[in-house]
Amino acid sequence: MTAPRISVDTKPHVVIRASAGSGKTFQLSNRYLDLLHHDFSPDSILATTFTRKAAGEILERILRRLAQASLDERAANELQQSLSSTKPITLARARDLLVLLCRSLHRVSVSTIDSFFNRIASSFRFELGVPHDPHLVAADDPLAVMVRAQAIEAMLGDADIDVFLDLLKRLHHDEVSRSVTDVIDRIVVALYDTYRQTRREDWHRLPDPPRMNGEQFAAALAALDELAQNPPSKALAGGIKRNRESILAGDWKGFACRGIAKKLIADGPGARFNKQPISPGVAKLIGEFIA
């Protein structure tokens, strides 16, 4: 589905919101090129996103499309069709816009939102009463990395070694890592874009599922041990054994991707394993660990 082209004349400012992989970078580059083609100066255009990687991809896409359009008629026609203006994009016009943009790269504002506000705050620090060395930094700035590490260290400060080991297994599974902090930090950075695009209440919309306490877990595990020793059928024996091994190893990803649990998660009630119906008793017991 092609996104509608938004006229520069009717809407000089736009926000493009969409999920990952849906074409935001392409649409943002369209918008930027449309403004350039309408004779807006590069230093008067602001394009912001959440991460440095995304900002770099937007600027790269803009430069690449102009370069291609300056050398190839077909690329110029494709660019013309993506813009709202009926003013033609010729090879010469694309080349002129590319030269203009390259000569203004030091004044181009295609950056993260954090970086943009950091520049504003730094430029007007006397008017805003901001200290000379403000702690206004982008998420991947070295200072932000250090502060984030300190926050994670403080969060884990009261935990014992068993908690560290369990956290490493849950977050990193079979991969080797020397630091719980590094693992958590990588996850925080990877999910930063998603976090910035959501509202505070979104994180509390779904209630936490009920969890077994220690006694309940021990009872369920004892029942699973007995079931593994006396499986209801040979067809189900292998699946029960694999799920039990994953539970004992604390490998919950492996648990969900193997044996009876995998079939129950994928197919729900009435699931079959090795062409054998999973009995309600087996489904209920394995389901206690899934919940």
Image: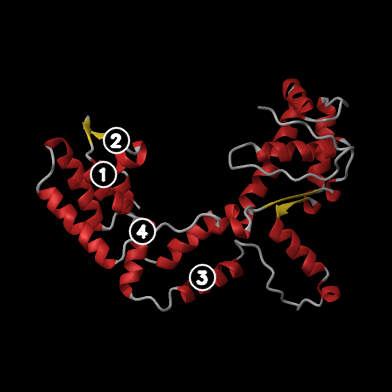
**Which residue is situated farthest in the left direction here?**
230
Q: Quadrant of residue 156?
A: bottom left
- The residue lying toward the viewer, choosing from 114 and 262, is 262
What residue sits right under mark 2 in the picture?
A: 271
Q: What percent of the width, then of the height, locates residue 36? A: 84, 39
Mark closest to the chain's N terminus, 4 or 2 = 4
Label 3 secondary element: helix
Which quadrant holds the N terminus?
A: top right
Tag 1–tag 2 contact (CB < 8 Å): yes
20 left or right of 9?
left
Question: How far is mark 3 from mark 1, CA to CA?
Answer: 42 Å
Q: Amino acid at mark 2?
A: Ala
What residue sits right under mark 3 in the picture?
A: 149
What residue sits right under mark 1 in the picture?
A: 283
Q: What percent of the width, then of the height, locates residue 10? A: 88, 38
- Disc 1 residue crowd, few under 14, some 14–19, many 20+, Cα 10 Å: some
